[in-house]
Image: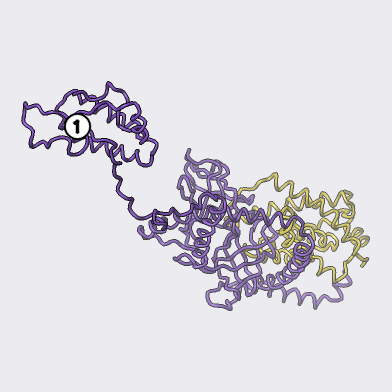
Amino acid sequence: MAMIPHSTRREKDEHSLHPAALILIPVLAIFLQVYLPLRFPSIQVLNLPVLVVIYFAVSRRSPVAGTLIGMIIGIIQDAMTHLPLGINGIVDCIVGYLAASIGVRVDVENPGSRLIINFAFMLLASVLHIIILGRLLGMHQHWIWVHQLIRAVVNALVGVVLFALFDRMRRRA
Amino acid sequence: MESFLSRYRNPLILLTVVLVQLLGLAVQVRRTPSHPGGEQVSLIRYWVVSLVTPIERIFLFSGHGLSGTWNNYIDLRHVRQQNAQLQAELDRMRLEQASLAEAARQDIRLQRLLGFQQQYVAKTVAAHVIGTSGSELSRVLYIDKGFDNGVRIDQPVITPDGVVGKIRNVFAGTAQVLELNDPTSGLGVILTQTRLRGILRGNTAGQLEIVDVLPDERIEPGEPVVTSGGDGIFPRGMPVGAVERAIADPERNPYVALLVKPAVNLTRLDEVLVVTQTSDAMPAAMQQDVTTSEQKAADILAQRLPGAAVEPQLGPDGKPIDANAPPPPVRPPAPLHPDRFTPGATPPATSLQPGATYPVQTFAAQPAASAPSTVGSAAEPSQSAPAHAKSDSAAAPAHSVATKPDARPARTAGAAHGRKNSTTTSTPANPESQPQP
């Protein structure tokens, strides 16, 4: 991953999505996340909302925007569960902030870079879940790390394909 | 992007501040329940569920419409064969149900004697599953029935195969179901064979486990697990699953955890039943089913066993014999010739004197031609068999007064012979066994 100056990257590759896409993509991701496991239970291993947060944060290259997007999408995710609101909100918020911070320094257009970023952020999300559930909420659970690794790999691969699709909707700002 | 932010900086900041405060309010403020007995739900949860579930409902019913058209009108291959198989299975089930009905009644009587109140599922609401939580951390389902349909918090959710979970949150037309395999769920269960009780819950991997169980060699894989009824939510005896294996629990030594394979496929649920009402008495529909099954079982047996339908026996007068009437008394057939066993041939015991000799009436040996006539009585087994049995006991008093001691072996042989073979007469065919004067 080639490191490039902050200003150059930002000036060179700043893109934006259509306002409708900004709303429809997260809504569609959340809907698919809650509906598809009914028909295909193994799809629950995916975390489409987090992938959307990563993509939006990376493409906008604004930590504030990434934080806000992560917070909103995460809270909506929480609302569909029976757990306290804020678990996914905090996780997605941190992921969005870090993804946006990395996006301004690293070439995130390369599929290889995207694969590594997605994999790393998915593992980070798992670690944050463990910390929040185990330390903050006292919900001690046995974590299967092999499962988390597989989950991160699958999400990273799916993320590369999804990001390529999202790229087609982008327009230069 | 910077131009967009600089251009709309103030409205965006205002919007952000308002949004954050709104979210904070939504998280903190709990919506007052719109119905009595309902639980307060946070505003944000209410909004999101109200927004997402209608879309899920539209997708679900459009998909059901298409699949229903295909399945009900187009794809009807092998329906007749399937129908015949189902009919045969229904017949078998009716036979089984009829055989179990009496045991169930006895169980009910014993439970009444013990003062135990059995809970029956009296009323259910069928619901479609329209969504999930979308997270492995929260194993919940959304169904398309809510408060308006009589669904309330903590009501059991089942399928014909077994328990699914219980209602966690209720909205107007939607409800949230907490599945059994969620780590925060808990269910009182009992192992049917070893009668061990425990608490069943889910683990992180979505498996069911009974925790805090002492190691017991009697527990074997495959042992059914049913609800214990002690939690006051699920009726007793509902199938939950079967024991898969025991695993060590390092945090709670020496206890172990039993992994349970659920009776219901929790990952593929289309329709569920919400138990909205239970009762202490067996529902009328269930009683009707049992009665119908018993009648149908009798019909099925009659069809399968044509010989079982015995025609009524007719008496000598041509009228059918009542099976419950007492049997007519069995009388010995009339003797072909009088002998010393004939009543009246031996003087009464009161007229006998000790030491005195009395003439014993003897009879000449029957000619060979008469033997068949004697044995010929055996040709009528329906008469001779009971007659012989009767005569054996009737002859005993006569033997007891016989004065000839050599008559005793004949009596013993005759009696023994009569006991061994009831189809032959007591008249000895061997001349040596004939009583000698």
Q: Left or right? Give the position of B304 relative to B388.
A: right
Whether residue A67 is visible to the viewer of this picture, yes or no, is: no
Q: Left or right? Give the position of A160 relative to B108.
A: right
Whether residue B238 is visible to the viewer of this picture, yes or no, is: yes
Residue B293, position as x, y percentages in the image: 53, 59
Q: Which residue is drawn at 29% across and 36% down?
A: B336
Q: Residue at x 92, y 60 (%)?
A: A13
Q: Nearer the viewer, residue B298 or B148?
A: B298
Q: Residue at x 26, y 35 (%)?
A: B337
Q: Where is mark 1, residue-wise?
A: B399
Residue farthest top in this picture? B432
Indicate the chain on which mark 1 is placed. Answer: B
Picture quadrant of residue B64: bottom right
Q: Nearer the viewer, residue B77 or B4?
A: B77
Quarter holding the C terminus of chain B is top left
Residue B109, position as x, y percentages in the image: 39, 58
Which chain appears yellow?
A
Picture quadrant of residue B269: bottom right
Which chain appears purple?
B
Question: Looking at the picture, does residue B264 appear above or below residue B388?
Answer: below
Q: Which of B165 and B302 is in front in this view?
A: B302
Question: Looking at the picture, does residue B30 appear above or below residue B381?
Answer: below
The disc labelled 1 sits on which kind of residue?
His
